[in-house]
Image (cartoon, rainbow, N blue to C red):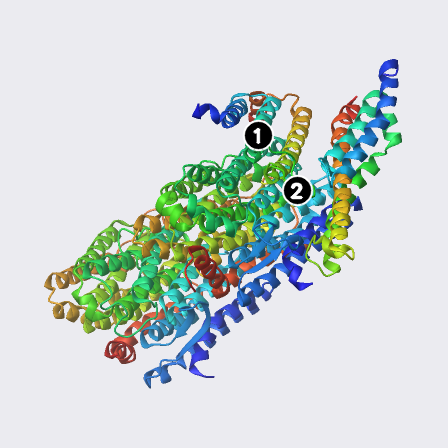
């Protein structure tokens, strides 16, 4: 059975999705979602440890050997991404029970969890598959369910946000499928490893750069790279709290993984950077994203929107690390995938608890909460410190490697931008902190601390920020090996 | 208890005390006893390290490794021990003082106050015993963040604004410059550990290392080298015990201590002397000394004047480090102790006046010396220490700093030191002189007879004032520790 | 003639541009979806035409018979693509229905006006 | 549309043929054009036609929404379940060879099961989508 873990990782959540729909009652549906998330988490840990011990795992669906059949191929890179997705799911799902009960109609909850589990299955599928068309299919599974999830938000603007995301997301997915089609035209294969071998034979043909460009734009849309980020702030702001926390920590991460997979594994770093000069596009955009989006975050009065802009800036960090096209840079980028999931997850869960009690996430709603919801706000502050990059947090480790990668190449401005970004982060986080701790409450009714069911997952993520900030050798080690795999450097 | 773990205990003890404070929040008397007991215990723990360190031991303890090569590690060496001794000893006295101050001033949220105080002390201990740049930086930032609730203790708009300046400058310099410098050091040397003789020798050109040095000197915002000094006056909105212990001793001394550590253990004095940037930075420090003294003149608010005096005095230590010779370093290190005892007394006096007579402006303190003779007497003695004249300890540190400038062949800097001493003579002694000899201003109501502040406060300031005299008579312990630093 | 020989690609490009233009130029949410559908359809045609071989039939091999057949893989792939397209359109339309219920309009500018008032 | 006799009779005549055609497409799928996707849509078309002509209330009586809902879910489970079954029988995921004694029969059985899952889901989802849109206005009125 254990040989089948790669496929079971995806299939069990996929089976749980209809099961959640069939339960037709909120609690059992949640239980099924919990089962799926827990299963995925356990399996992803097993997979990661096996990959680290034995190297790449290849699984052939239906026993059809690649490149004819669909292959699930797990190496250090996607084992790590799978762990991020399932780990976040395992923390957010317990949180979702109370939060979703408050924000969504009881009649819709079973279908909510169906979409939630489907979204998770889709993200896991993108991560494990070794077949480019399969990537597209899973991408659409996760995206369609994400649109549905976002539309469940309590505000009616959730609907327009979801619509906007649907349009942008579909354009992105269509671009990706065009790129895949063009690659298939030239090579006649869809298997990633096979593509990587055959593409160099035909890359003089003009079709390949066109495919490259379509994929670059499509994936950038999905990962909300500036200036293709316009769908993100509204989607994150108006989605239900649990959905925001889940999608913010996983969906864009998986999109970044797609970028890594397509441009490093399939096209190869040499083609992507030396021939196509991807870095000349990605790096300026990443830098602009870091600076302008952090600045935008400062001016937001809705805390979820503030964090959403911050997310775009943080995606800029990942892309910046990747665009350096060095092992250290990639290590930093991959590391930040994980670390950002931890800190943004913690922050969004804390904001979700505020939503749970006060019914609003505007800055005004947070007045005086430092006293009324001490645990929630303490979690917010601690996760915020991680976002700023204070030592002993994961944010610091990310920043350390990013700056190191920049200095290694002798590119001072890169290092400077990273540090300026963290100072801007300090400003927008502190804006919230000041409101929570220094303003007197303007609401009539005092509020109570969030229930334990919300606090516990939130604090697990917050403490993880510090645990992995102090014992980073695990995450850094995996990220480093993943970077070596992607760069094709012998270990 | 082995010496390695003693250092860890020194870091953990204040935190445990802090938890005790939280647990005892409903019983103020017990809560304050917890603080006092912790403070005394901490001092003895730190003092127990004196023997082994004098015997040449350099106990080291790796708490955990973040990534290979970068670990949170503690190491006891003479300079750090000196700083830890000063800070922990003064914490005892400050605890005593704050009990009187916080109660008679009817401050709110006293539990929070005492708790974050312990956090700050713990971070200061961690910084003192840090074995590498990463550890130092980590505790440096914890100290910044841990003191933020203390600076903004009153929760007013003014406090919030001051808090912004405080965090803004300290975070931007530390993240913007210092962190960059640390990562660069890591890239150049492959290590961030403190080693006698430095780790950077021969790793890059003198020009590059000069840039690195500039990043360090301005990146340590807590050393308040101009133009990154604004946070210190801003922090004066805090309750006086905070200004006294943290912004005259722990926080600012962590800043200059960091610079000394970097000068001695990262660059190494020999390398430092050869860098082209070193003399320029020394002059920048000298400029800070003079400019801050001049600004101090213009301040009528006593705490603000003391703050600028602190900025000026801190640059003495920075200057000592940048002279890059043993006399300068000895003088700088001794000044950590000497200035600490002097300045804390001055702040104690400012707080005592605020509590007893409700005055904060110097011009309103005329004639107050007759009402509070002990307090202003202590101010006078402590001022002498800051100025650097007998019979107070400040003489010795200034003496060695002067020798250092001569050894470095920088007569101009010596002149600067002299000038600054003259300036401080005027702006500090103005306070007790006017308090004793000027008539009471119109409109100020003064109760007849002697009305001192509550006894714990008076006791505290008398003790520290006496200590400055004591350090004049017995400077050897401090001097010995610093010679050990230089001799390595 | 060479350019005309690639007529299937011209069809794809034409449809793609028509769809894309409709998508970005129309303020009506349903028309946008129509644009999106046309846009996606162009990709279907791209896939379908790439698998076609002149004179080829369905890839069913009879015993003892040699047949020229079209590449079935792109066709199978795009079958999935079509299903995805239907799902996207369905989700999009259902969102439009709910937007209409919430706002009383499906014109983008009118929706923006209402949201700004809030 | 109760008064449109031609439509009502026409629908009555057509619907059985549509259903049979759907079955043909379904079962002919393994050696001719066709398969679960198409069959499911054709099945759904029959019911949608019924609902259009006879009204949603009547259609609901023929095919309660719950059944549609269950169909959509169960189909996916049949599909994935087949895959899991092959796992339990010792093969890889969706390795039909292990389903029967001979690999050829296994392949045939496997594809039938999978197509059964597909047809059920597609039918369920199609009718559900129709329901979701058509049923929307009724509540409002």
Residue that mark 1 sits on: C45
Q: Is residue A158 visible?
A: yes
Give me the residue at 34% from left, 76% from top.
B77
* Residue D118 location (% of width, % of height): 74, 41
- Graded by Cα atoms within 10 Å as few (under 14), some (14 to 19) or many (20 or more), the crowding at tag 1 reads some
Mark 1 — on which chain does it sit? Answer: C
User: Label 1's element?
Assistant: helix
Q: Nearer the viewer, residue B8 or A442?
A: B8
Give me the residue at 13% from left, 61% from top.
B415
User: Label 2's element?
Assistant: loop
Q: Is residue B452 visible?
A: no
Q: CA distance from mark 1 to mark 2?
A: 61 Å
Q: Nearer the viewer, residue B419 or B106?
A: B419
Residue that mark 2 sits on: A445
Asked whether, in this view, residue B467 is left or right of residue A242, the answer is left
Give me the residue at 65% from left, 24% from top.
C103
* Residue A1 location (% of width, % of height): 69, 63
Residue farthest along the bottom direction in this orientation: B55
Q: In the rendered view of the protein, which quadrant contains the C terminus of chain B?
A: bottom left
Location of residue D34 (image quadrant): top right
Asked whether, in this view, residue A277 is left or right of residue A440, the answer is left
Q: Are marks 1 and 2 on the same chain?
A: no
B246 to C4, vertically: above or below: below
């Amino acid at each position: 059975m254990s040989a089948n873990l790669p496929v079971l990782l995806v299939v069990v959540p996929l089976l749980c999705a209809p099961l959640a729909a069939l339960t037709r009652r909120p609690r059992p549906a949640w239980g099924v979602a919990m089962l799926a998330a827990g299963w995925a988490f356990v399996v992803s840990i097993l997979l990661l440890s096996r990959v680290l011990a034995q190297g790449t795992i290849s699984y052939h669906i239906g026993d059809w050997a690649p490149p004819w059949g669909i292959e699930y191929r797990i190496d250090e890179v996607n084992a790590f991404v799978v762990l991020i997705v399932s780990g976040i799911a395992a923390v957010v799902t317990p949180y979702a029970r109370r939060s979703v009960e408050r924000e969504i109609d009881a009649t819709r909850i079973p279908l909510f969890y169906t979409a939630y589990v489907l979204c998770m299955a889709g993200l896991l599928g993108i991560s494990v598959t070794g077949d480019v068309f399969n990537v597209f299919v899973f991408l659409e599974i996760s995206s369609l369910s994400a649109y549905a999830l976002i539309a469940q938000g309590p505000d009616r603007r959730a609907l327009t946000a979801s619509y906007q995301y649907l349009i942008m997301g579909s354009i992105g997915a269509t671009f990706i499928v065009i790129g895949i089609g063009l690659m298939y035209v030239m090579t006649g294969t869809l298997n990633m490893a096979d593509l990587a071998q055959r593409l160099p034979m035909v890359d003089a043909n003009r079709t390949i750069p066109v495919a490259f460009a379509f994929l670059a734009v499509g994936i950038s849309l999905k990962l909300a790279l500036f200036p293709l980020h316009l769908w993100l702030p509204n989607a994150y702001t108006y989605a239900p709290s649990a959905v925001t926390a889940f999608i913010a920590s996983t969906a864009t991460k998986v999109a970044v993984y797609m970028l890594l997979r397509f441009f490093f594994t399939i096209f190869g770093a040499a083609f992507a950077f030396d021939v196509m000069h991807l870095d000349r596009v990605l790096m300026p955009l990443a830098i602009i994203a870091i600076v302008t989006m952090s600045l935008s975050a400062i001016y937001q009065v809705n805390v979820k929107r503030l964090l959403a802009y911050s997310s775009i800036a943080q995606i800029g960090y990942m892309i910046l690390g990747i665009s350096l096209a060095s092992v250290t840079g990639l290590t930093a980028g991959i590391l930040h995938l994980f670390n950002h999931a931890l800190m943004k997850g913690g922050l969004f869960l804390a904001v979700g608890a505020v939503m749970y009690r006060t019914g609003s996430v505007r800055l005004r709603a947070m007045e005086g909460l430092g006293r009324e919801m001490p645990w929630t706000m303490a979690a917010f502050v601690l996760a915020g410190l991680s976002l700023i990059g204070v030592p002993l947090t994961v944010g610091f480790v990310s920043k350390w490697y990013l700056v190191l990668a920049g200095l290694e190449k002798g590119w001072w401005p890169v290092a400077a931008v990273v540090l300026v970004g963290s100072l801007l982060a300090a400003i927008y986080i502190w804006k919230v902190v000041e409101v929570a701790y220094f303003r007197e409450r303007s609401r009539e009714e005092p509020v109570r601390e969030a229930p334990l069911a919300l606090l516990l997952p939130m604090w697990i993520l917050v403490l993880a920020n510090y645990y992995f900030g102090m014992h980073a050798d695990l995450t850094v080690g995996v990220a480093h090996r993943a970077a070596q795999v992607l760069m094709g450097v012998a270990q | 208890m082995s010496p390695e773990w003693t250092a860890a205990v020194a870091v953990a003890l204040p935190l445990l005390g802090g938890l005790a404070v939280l647990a005892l929040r409903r019983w103020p008397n017990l809560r304050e006893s917890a603080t006092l007991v912790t403070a005394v215990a901490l001092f003895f723990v730190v003092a127990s390290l004196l023997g082994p360190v004098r015997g040449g031991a350099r106990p080291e303890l790796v708490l955990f490794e973040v990534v290979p090569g970068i670990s949170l590690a503690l190491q006891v060496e003479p300079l750090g021990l000196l700083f830890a001794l000063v800070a922990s000893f003064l914490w005892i006295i400050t605890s005593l003082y704050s009990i009187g101050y916080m109660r008679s001033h009817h401050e709110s949220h006293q539990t929070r106050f005492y708790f974050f105080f312990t956090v700050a002390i713990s971070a200061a201990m961690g910084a003192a015993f840090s074995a590498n740049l990463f550890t130092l930086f980590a505790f440096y930032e914890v100290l910044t963040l841990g003191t933020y609730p203390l600076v903004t203790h009153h929760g007013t708009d003014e406090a919030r604004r001051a808090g912004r300046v405080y965090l803004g400058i300290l975070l931007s310099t530390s993240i913007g410059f210092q962190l960059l410098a640390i990562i660069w050091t890591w890239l150049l040397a492959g290590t961030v550990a403190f080693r006698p003789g430095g780790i950077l020798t021969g790793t890059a050109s003198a020009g590059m290392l000069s840039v690195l040095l500039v990043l360090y000197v301005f990146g340590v915002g807590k050393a308040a080298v101009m133009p990154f000094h604004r946070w210190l006056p801003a922090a004066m909105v805090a309750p006086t015990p905070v200004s006294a212990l943290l912004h005259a001793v722990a926080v600012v001394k962590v800043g200059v201590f960091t610079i000394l550590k970097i000068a001695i253990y990262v660059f190494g004095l020999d390398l430092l002397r050869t860098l082209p940037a070193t003399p320029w930075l020394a002059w920048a420090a000298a400029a800070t000394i003079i400019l801050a003294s001049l600004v101090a003149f213009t301040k009528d608010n006593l705490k603000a004047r003391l703050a600028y005096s602190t900025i000026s005095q801190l640059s003495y230590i920075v200057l000592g480090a940048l002279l890059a010779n043993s006399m300068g370093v000895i003088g700088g290190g001794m000044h950590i102790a000497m200035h600490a005892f002097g300045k804390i007394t001055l702040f104690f006096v400012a707080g005592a006046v605020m509590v007893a007579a409700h005055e904060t402006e110097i011009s309103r303190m005329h004639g107050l010396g007759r009402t509070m003779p002990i307090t202003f007497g202590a101010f006078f003695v402590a001022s002498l220490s800051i100025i650097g004249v007998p019979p107070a300890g400040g003489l010795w540190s200034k003496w060695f700093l002067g020798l250092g400038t001569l050894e470095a062949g920088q007569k101009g800097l010596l002149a600067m030191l002299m000038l600054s001493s003259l300036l401080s003579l005027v702006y500090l002694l103005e306070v007790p002189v006017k308090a004793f000899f000027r008539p009471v201003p119109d409109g100020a109501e003064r109760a007849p007879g002697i009305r001192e502040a509550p006894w714990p406060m008076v006791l505290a300031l008398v003790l520290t004032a006496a200590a400055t005299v004591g350090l004049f008579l017995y400077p050897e312990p401090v001097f010995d520790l610093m010679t050990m630093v230089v001799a390595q | 003639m060479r350019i005309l020989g690639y007529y299937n690609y011209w069809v794809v490009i034409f449809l793609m541009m028509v769809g894309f233009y409709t998508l970005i130029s129309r303020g009506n949410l349903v028309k946008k979806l129509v644009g999106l559908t046309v846009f996606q359809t162009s990709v279907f045609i791209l896939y379908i035409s790439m698998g076609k071989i002149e004179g080829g039939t369905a890839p069913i091999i009879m015993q003892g018979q040699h047949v020229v057949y079209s590449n079935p893989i792109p066709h199978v792939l795009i079958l999935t693509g079509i299903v995805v397209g239907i799902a996207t359109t369905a989700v999009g339309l259902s969102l439009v229905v709910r937007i209409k219920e919430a706002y009383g309009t499906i014109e983008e500018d009118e929706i923006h006006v209402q949201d700004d008032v809030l | 549309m109760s008064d449109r006799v031609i439509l009502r009779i026409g629908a009555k005549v057509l619907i059985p043929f549509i259903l049979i055609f759907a079955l043909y497409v379904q079962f002919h799928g393994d050696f001719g054009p066709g398969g679960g996707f198409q069959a499911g849509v054709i099945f759904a078309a029959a019911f949608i036609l019924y609902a259009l002509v006879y009204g949603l209330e009547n259609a609901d009586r023929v095919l309660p929404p719950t059944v549609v809902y269950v169909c959509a879910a169960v189909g996916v489970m049949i599909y994935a379940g087949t895959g899991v079954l092959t796992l339990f029988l010792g093969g890889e995921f969706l390795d039909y060879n292990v389903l029967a004694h001979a690999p050829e029969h296994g392949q045939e059985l496997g594809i039938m099961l999978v197509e059964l899952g597909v047809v059920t889901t597609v039918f369920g989802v199609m009718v559900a989508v129709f329901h979701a849109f058509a049923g929307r206005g009724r509540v409002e009125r």
